[in-house]
Image (cartoon, grey):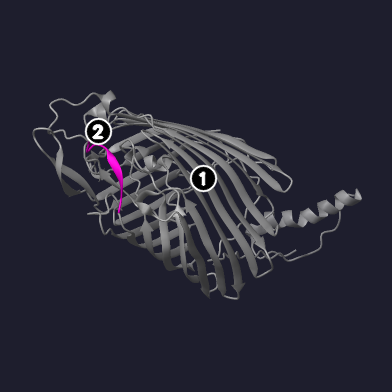
């Protein structure tokens, strides 16, 4: 036997011995003749294909895959939620966090400045073909804040339970979410306060509960795909306001042939809301469409029919909008352009509004947004492996689009305000994402929202420009580094000129909020297989900006803690 390199002698002997051993096991004999052979080792080539750009996201509900229990690094809690940096309108499709599923369990705990305590628990079974179930718990609280210490403290606690069973062709599941949040109305004028008001007089507490049961088919190859759900949401605040929402949803599609399918989606909601008055708010919407694919052209034609029981601003209760989309593949798996006509009713609830702005005044009149008709166009592109580019422009005509403005009698609280006429909106959205083998991840998202409000002085507390620059780096699964830079342009709120004698507001003064520039950093270091330490830094530039007028956020704030995986 001849070898090309003496260093390959041990490896060659193993290769040569393997077939002889296998033959001996089959025949029961030992020994044999090894003939002369020349061994040549060739390094195999692995071809990596770029991520495909698709015209349509068809309904695919895959059965759960059985996964290993190995824990991978993720960013489930990159930002401290107490900062309340939620924009009023977001059109984001790229997730800036590494969201690979955790198949193991973990416990987290941390402490920080402002008297901050943080805890999180993720307790789930190992994914299997029979069932999946688990528990998620999260808590974060700050004893003090940016204004008069305890007067601007806050806390958020949530508990989630979920379970799924996989029997036959159907998946059955249920979810339960419970939450409690405590905030304070600390946006008072400190220059006119001789003494800070008592903390209990500023108190606002939200209690939330949401339950959902659902069913969907498991087979992705079945001609009929469906996902149906029934839900109930309950919300109440510290001013004895309550909201109950019974809902149902349907997402379905039926394949007619290789090139065509029909799809039907629908939503049903019945809200009972009570504060000083009791209001019932019915809502129903259905969108049937026909989809056709012809070579590079993808066409979807349908209509959206919706009804809302809201009568605010005399907006039409029954609405019909087009649902038309045309997509054309310019370069296969590389570049797709699209355009269309659309519109829909958008359900608005106090459950959701108070997650955006927790300082709403009592007795708000909530109305669904009539978005449409709309015109949109854009493109999706993957010009190179690991690189994605997306852009979209939307022109819409909205009625009952809500804005937040300061309450005339109490500037620490906010009212929902609506333009008496339609609001014209142009949204320009763009995003770039580079993801190299989950080791380096860099992305940028930006939105411009141009509002034309005929009767409102400004688009109150809706910033015109929003952007996010984010990145992460995984160093040998030992050290994970991440950064985010948020920017929001200035928006507007209102102050009021008052008579000295009785304090009655006599004039409104529109005031700009601050421009937001917020830098956040994170580092995770794995000490051993099941134990790691982490540090979070938020608002590292230390700017106590006001996202909502009169409400400065916390300055430089950090958390440091440990994570235990098991």
Quarter the C terminus occupies: top right
| Residue at point 29%, 42% (across, down) | 415
**Looking at the rendered structure, which numbered label has been put on residue 431?**
none
Q: At which x and y percent is residue 120?
A: 46, 33
**Looking at the rendered structure, which numbered label has been put on residue 269?**
1
Task: Judge from the rendering whether residue 538 lies leftward or rightward of residue 235; answer left or right.
Answer: left
Task: Judge from the rendering whether residue 303 lies leftward or rightward of residue 453; answer left or right.
Answer: right
| Residue at point 25%, 51% (across, down) | 491
Q: At which x and y percent is residue 466?
A: 32, 55
* Label 2 sits on residue: 186
Residue 441 occupies which quadrant of the picture?
bottom left
Residue 413 located within the stretch drawn in magenta: yes
Q: Secondary structure at mark 1?
A: strand
In the image, the segment drawn in magenta is 410-419
Q: At which x and y percent is residue 440?
A: 44, 54
Residue 51 is at least partly visible in this image: no
Task: Judge from the rendering whether residue 286 lies leftward or rightward of residue 16; answer left or right.
Answer: left
Q: Which mark sits nearer the N-terminus, 2 or 1?
A: 2
């Amino acid at each position: 036997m001849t070898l090309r390199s003496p260093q390959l002698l041990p490896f060659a002997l193993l290769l040569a011995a393997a077939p002889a051993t296998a033959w001996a096991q089959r025949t029961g004999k030992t020994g044999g003749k090894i003939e002369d052979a020349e061994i040549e080792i060739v390094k195999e080539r692995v071809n990596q294909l770029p991520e495909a750009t698709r015209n349509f996201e068809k309904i695919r509900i895959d059965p759960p895959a059985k996964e290993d229990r190995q824990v991978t690094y993720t960013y489930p809690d990159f930002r401290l939620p107490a900062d309340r940096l939620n924009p009023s309108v977001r059109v984001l499709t790229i997730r800036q966090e590494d969201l690979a599923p955790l198949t193991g369990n973990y416990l987290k705990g941390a402490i920080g400045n402002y008297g901050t305590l943080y805890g999180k628990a993720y307790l789930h079974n190992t994914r299997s073909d029979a069932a999946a179930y688990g528990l998620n718990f999260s808590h974060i609280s700050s004893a003090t804040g940016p204004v008069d210490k305890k007067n601007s403290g806050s806390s958020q606690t949530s508990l989630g339970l979920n379970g799924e069973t996989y029997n036959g062709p159907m998946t059955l599941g249920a979810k339960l979410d419970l939450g409690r949040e405590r905030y304070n109305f600390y946006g008072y004028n400190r220059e006119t306060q001789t003494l800070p008001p008592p903390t209990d007089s500023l108190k606002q507490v939200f209690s939330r509960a949401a339950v959902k049961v659902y069913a969907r088919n498991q087979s992705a190859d079945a001609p009929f795909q469906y996902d149906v759900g029934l839900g109930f949401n309950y919300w109440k605040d510290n001013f004895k306001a309550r909201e109950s929402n019974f809902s149902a949803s349907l997402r379905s599609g039926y394949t007619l042939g290789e090139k065509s399918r029909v799809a039907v989606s629908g939503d049903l909601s019945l809200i009972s809301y009570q504060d000083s008055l009791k209001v019932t708010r019915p809502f129903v919407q259905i969108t049937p469409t026909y989809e056709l694919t012809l070579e590079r052209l993808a066409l979807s034609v349908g209509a959206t029919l919706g009804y809302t029981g809201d009568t605010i601003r005399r907006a039409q209760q029954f609405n019909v909008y087009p649902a038309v989309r045309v997509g054309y593949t310019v370069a296969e798996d590389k570049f797709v352009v699209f355009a269309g006509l659309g519109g829909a009713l958008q359900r608005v609830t106090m459950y959701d509004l108070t997650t955006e702005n927790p300082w709403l005044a009592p007795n708000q009149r909530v109305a669904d947004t009539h978005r449409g008709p709309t015109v949109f166009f854009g493109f999706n592109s993957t010009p190179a492996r690991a690189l994605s580019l997306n852009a979209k422009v939307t022109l819409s005509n909205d009625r009952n689009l809500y804005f937040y403005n300061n309450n005339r009698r109490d500037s620490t609280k906010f009212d929902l305000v609506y333009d008496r006429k339609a609001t014209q909106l142009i949204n320009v959205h763009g995003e770039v994402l580079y993801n190299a083998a989950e080791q380096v991840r860099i992305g940028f998202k930006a939105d411009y929202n141009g509002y034309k409000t005929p009767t409102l002085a400004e688009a109150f507390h809706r910033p015109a420009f929003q952007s996010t620059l984010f990145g992460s780096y995984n160093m040998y699964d030992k050290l994970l580094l991440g950064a985010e830079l948020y920017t929001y342009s200035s928006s507007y709120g209102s102050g009021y000129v008052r008579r000295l004698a009785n304090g009655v507001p006599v004039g409104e003064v529109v005031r700009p909020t601050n421009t937001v520039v917020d830098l956040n950093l994170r580092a995770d270091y794995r000490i051993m297989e099941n134990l790691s330490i982490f540090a979070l830094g938020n608002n590292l530039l230390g700017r106590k900006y006001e996202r909502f007028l009169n409400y400065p956020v916390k300055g430089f704030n950090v958390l440091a803690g440990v994570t235990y995986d098991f």
